Amino acid sequence: MTLTRRKTLALLGGGTILAATAGAGYKVTRMPLTAFEPWATAGNYNEPRMRALSYAILAPNPHNRQPWQVDLRTDAEVTLRVDRNRLLPHTDPFNRQIVVGLGCFLELMCLAAAQDGYGVDLDLFPDGEDPTGLDDRRVAVARFILNGTTPEPDLFEQVMTRRSYKKPFDTSQPVDAATLSRVLAAAKFTSFAGSVAPDDIAALRGISRDALRIELETPRTYKESVDLLRIGHREVAANPDGIDFTGPMFEAMALTGIFTRKAALDRTSMTYIEGEKAVFANTDTAMGHLWQVTPTNTRSDQINAGRDWLRMNLATAGLGLGMQPLSQGLQEYPEMSDIYDQMHARLAPKGGVVQMFARIGYGPNVGQSPRWPLESKIVNA
């Protein structure tokens, strides 16, 4: 069913179309509670590795694919591999962004372990690495060492409030330079920079919009995202990953067949048109930007990029800021090459690789992202 403007306005404005019967009203207001249980159970494990991992699975990652698999067969060790069924071959053809996500996972595990008095020695890609893609080789072996590090409570206490911000920012509330400096100070492994200058904001908003438009208008890259839509509580509960849409409005649209993957792929539908407006509203309300540069682009560089990306997420949360990755312009497929070069010329004029890029700003609270339970990520334990 095509989403007409009348139907869109009725659902957005009234929100009571399906509440005429008790059964429909229940379905519309239903939330996928099991998909958020990992947030409630984080830290509720006695074994140190399990406790650290219960926080690590909450780490940010591309398209919320949660591509980690862990092996606990060796005492005091965690072996990390990638789940190759959770890659993004069209928007991330060399798996660079997936590795950055694995770095986020490892850093959050390390921060959580430190809270319990454990240092973590990371041996990255001990079986070697392939710059063109990931395979079944180990990503990391993490060895837990009692009394091996110093905790960072100021960062760790933000784990439960960290979010990937997917709403427009308040354009009446600027981010000041002192706040930006406090965020950038959290970087430990890579070089981070940023700007809240009006001219830079305007230019980077434009580049972000251009990059997003290319991803939306390139059929295979856009379909990769559409295939990962989770529409309504049933889909989110069944697959607590990908791009989730829950809440009364989306439940109503799903029940009536208005919001579907087919409609999302139809560039003439109101689903597509209104969705495009929504994502541009995010890029166009950036109140500052952050970016990260590594001197080279090894897999270890990408892991370190992820470790600092996690730290930036926690630092912004601690300051009441919202942060959203805008990675489209850094993706390495042919249609994006001009934007990729433009971003590197602007953000890394002395050379290096721009690993991540984000918008920051202030806005209303946003909810948690769904997660698979920790036990589902343990293999050969």
Image (spheres, grey):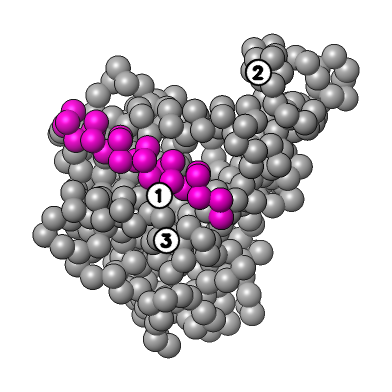
Question: Are the residues tagged 3 and 1 within 8 Å (C-beta)?
Answer: no
Residue at screen point 26% across, 38% down: 204
Type of amino acid under label 2: Arg
Q: Nearer the viewer, mark 3 or mark 1?
A: 3
Label 3: state its secondary structure: loop
Check disc 1 and report the residue beneath it: 328
Is residue 12 rendered magenta in the image? no
Check disc 2 and report the residue beneath it: 5
Residue 375 at what x, y percent from top left? 65, 64
Type of amino acid under label 3: Tyr
Q: Give the camera-side residue of 35 and 146.
A: 35
Label 1: state its secondary structure: helix
Is residue 212 rendered magenta in the image? yes
Type of amino acid under label 1: Gln
| Quarter of the N terminus within the rendering | top right
Quarter of the image for residue 188 reads bottom left
Note whether residue 183 is visible: yes
* Residue 38 placement, left or right of 156: right
Range covered by the magenta-colored residues = 197-220
